[in-house]
Amino acid sequence: MALDVLLVVPPCASAALPVLGPSILCAALREAGHDTHVLYANLEFAARVGFMPYRKFALSVERLHGEMLFAPEAWGQPLDVQPSEFDERVDGISYAEFMAALEHVPAFVSDTAALIASMKPRIVGFSSVFQQTIASVALAKAVRARLPEAVLLLGGANAAAPMGAAIAEATEAFDHVVSGEGEVGLPDLVTRILAGDAPAESVVQMPRVPRMDLVPTPVFDDFYAQVRPLMASERLPEGLPVALPFESSRGCWWGERSHCTFCGLNGLEIAERAHSPERVLADIEHLVATWGVTELRASDDLLPIRIQREVLPELARRQHARPEPLTFFYEVKSSMRRKDLQMLAAAGVTQVQAGLESLSTDTLKSMRKGVTGPMNIVFLREARAAGVDPLWNWMVGFPDDHKEDYDAFLRVAPFLHHLRPPVALAPVRVDRFSPYHGDPAAYGISALTPLPGAIRVWPDGADLHAISYHFTGSMKSPYRDNPRLAAKVHRGLADWSAAWAEGTPPELVGTEHPDGSITVRDTRRVAADAETRLSPEVATLLRRLDKPTPFEQAEEQSAVPAFGGLLQRGFVVQHEEALVSVVVFSSDTVDP
């Protein structure tokens, strides 16, 4: 019996967990009465090339190596690549690894198209986010040859205007490119197509979801049905999925107020729209009860304030009754206070993407982040105290940034080795929908150009400026213009990261005593002593410097000379004319 709709997740979507968009759309189509399934073609390709090599391709955003793999099948032209084009320091992919994966592509495309044709779907929808467009083109052409009567759609973030129209101009692989949110409009479009009333236009704009609670709960049955036999046959590793995705909001409440200059994640819909707290809790409980998972990852661009205030306390209350506590990932703002981080931990939000980006106040101001460098140091300290892992990238190479900002970071970094280091250095790029892309000249950016890999994956005549999401540009920055400074920056990060790669991360932990004194245990490389007892007077000063305090103000308030040795021991750091304690104290238990 023929399917109404088959949604296809092509390479190079992550193989570690289901994809949220198609899982929600599948639920919406089923609710509308359409027989719909999701084919995770990315899982089969990951099984063929190997899970870890595939992961590298999925993350190869700068080089577009994932898209390049499928260009020969998409356009019928051989791909001329040279070993000199590969740098494992950039994305971990070697020339040999690329060529080995490339050998799997023709058979994978043919086999997947044959599988799709055997399911006899009347409509095939390809999902494209980041590096999935060229694989979608290759698969669509192969499906068309085997199932010419099927209607082929392309949707996802890569189909947003103007990218969707440019894709439709560049290839006739798809009957329609579906642009925008599909939860409300796609079921109606499918009904029209199945009734023989397909739209005449090649690009179909979907209506905006008017209320988030109209979006159905995602369904993951097809992911489990496909990943389990791949794990059982040892073609993929055990333990998948590593987590299940869910959403509590779309948009960004901070970006709505102050759009970060480099960020284009929300497209043209930056205003926050959130599910009701009741709906978020219901979705979480449904996913846990249905699939037995204990780890969930929110897709939100930023944790909504209402969800923080109403959902997290309830999750914290429920943790005690669970046979195994839940853990969550959320994106948060680094202006969170101690009590906020403690509540995150109590609710099970043990890993966050904090959006710190930098410890330079000047750079943070240029980004419009609304925080300072010393405030971000406090966030890292309080996250360590609360038991929350704050993932962050150190973004560098901003237009018109200053050498002094990098020097200040390198001076303070050795004293922060007990706090979470950046995951990586991330030279800023220009993304579509960001202020940088909207008005590059206003930020000192010129010569805006699609990533070099785009030329390799699209045919001649394609409008790369309209198709592309990521761009490079010319901008003045000491990181970009001064190789010696860049090398020092890399060494500084490498030293910090090495401290966390040696087993147990360094500690700088304060223990308070009834008489008001504090014992500080210090295992950092810069430690003067493994243990130091601070007098009540010095301990009082240390606690006073929990918050960044201007040097002159701290000096006036200090009742002990030379700050009681706190600076010399690195228990307090001076960063950008402010003093701030970096000693971690154990968090008090939060009462939900």
Image (cartoon, rainbow, N blue to C red):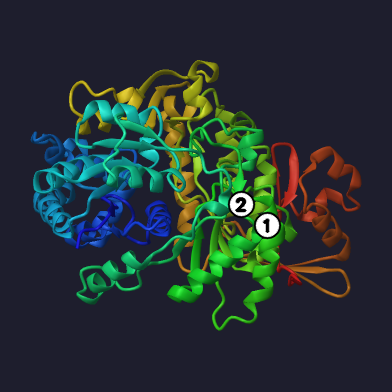
Residue bearing the label numbered 1 = 308
Is 446 located above or below residue 331 in the figure? above
Give the image location of residue 141, x and y in percent: 15, 41
Is 2 located above or below residue 361 in the figure? below
- Viewer-closest of 230 and 562: 230
Dividing the picture into quadrants, the one containing residue 47 is: bottom left
Residue 360 visible in the snapshot: no
Give the image location of residue 439, x and y in percent: 51, 19
Residue bearing the label numbered 2 = 303
Number of marks drawn: 2
Give the image location of residue 399, x and y in percent: 51, 24
**Left or right for 382, reference 30:** right
Give the image location of residue 113, x and y in percent: 14, 52
**Left or right for 474, reference 567:** left
Q: Quadrant of the C terminus?
A: bottom right
Q: Amino acid at mark 1?
A: Gln
Mark 2 or mark 1: name the one nearer the start of the chain.
2
Q: Residues within 10 Å of mark 2 (few under 14, many from 20)?
A: many
- Viewer-closest of 10 and 579: 10
**Left or right for 430, reference 195:** right
Seen at 29% across and 43% down, the residue is 193
Residues at discs 2 and 1 in contact (Cβ within 8 Å): yes
Q: Amino acid at mark 2?
A: Leu
**Left or right for 188, reference 364:** left
